[in-house]
Image (cartoon, helix red, strand yellow):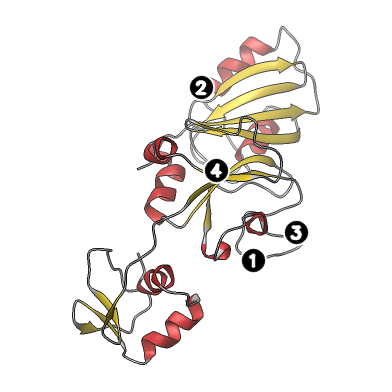
Amino acid sequence: MRLDKFICKSTELSRNEAKKLLKTGDVKVNGEVAKDPAMQVHENNSITIDGHELVARSSRYIMLHKVAETICSNVDEIYPSVLHFIDVDKAFDLHIAGRLDADTTGLVLITDDGRWSHNVISPKKQCPKVYRVWLRDEIMADELPGLVEHFKAGIQLQGEANLTRPAVLQQVDTDEVLLTITEGKYHQVKRMFAAVGNRVVGLHRESIGNVKLADLAPGEWRYLSEQEIAQFK
């Protein structure tokens, strides 16, 4: 973890305040003065401010039911950040593990543990994400088998050299499907259906790995259980 982030997790200082403190030379790592905010430290290191040992707070792991017209960002833009919904101390020190577009709803995972979030989003981990997708054009019964195989074999996205990884397509209604993917390319679900001549008109993420949105209401959040956290460790 970055030294400035460790200081934030151990004190009430903001990131900017931590950087200013580092310039004073009052911070030491294993007895040596440290001034670089980006210096990588571990919780087992001895980190002190003016001789006082720091102890980092435990990492936080949260799930949120994202509503439309919000963004997965630490700053507000045209739409407000989803972090406004999280009623915890220093909510804007958290980050989103796997972003959703402003018009997409559903499950978002939020944490301040960088290694953990990397395991959520890394393509190498092949973590399954399930999306409920509403389409502009209906899928007819005779089209479905071929489409299922097409998604299983991989879709050629515009501007991409390689096919997408195998995806699982399940029909719910003529214009509604569940799609399971194990990667997270830019606008991937929308681009996959565009590549087969259809258009996504509604998108909702229902699960990431074994973490399911279930009955969490739109705009609500909760801490993850130890079992939910452990699957991404």
For marks 4 and 1, the one nearer the N-term is: 1
Q: Which residue is the site of mark 4?
A: 185
Q: Which residue is the site of mark 2?
A: 153
Q: Which residue is the site of mark 3?
A: 79
Which residue is rendered at x = 68% and y = 27% of the image? 196
Q: Secondary structure at mark 3?
A: loop
Inspect the image, locate mark 4, and give the three-letter code of the amino acid beneath it.
Lys
Q: Secondary structure at mark 2?
A: helix
Q: Residue furthest top?
A: 142
> Is residue 65 depicted above or below 175 in this figure?
below
Tell me how far mark 2 sits from mark 4, CA to CA.
Answer: 17 Å
For marks 2 and 3, the one nearer the N-term is: 3
Q: Nearer the viewer, residue 116 or 50?
A: 50
Q: Residues within 10 Å of mark 2 (few under 14, many from 20)?
A: some
Q: Secondary structure at mark 1?
A: loop
Tell me how far mark 4 sits from mark 1, CA to CA.
Answer: 22 Å
Foreground mark, 2 or 4, reads: 4
Q: Residue furthest left?
A: 31
Inspect the image, locate mark 1, and give the three-letter code of the amino acid beneath it.
Val
Q: Which residue is the site of mark 1?
A: 75
Q: Residues within 10 Å of mark 4 (few under 14, many from 20)?
A: few
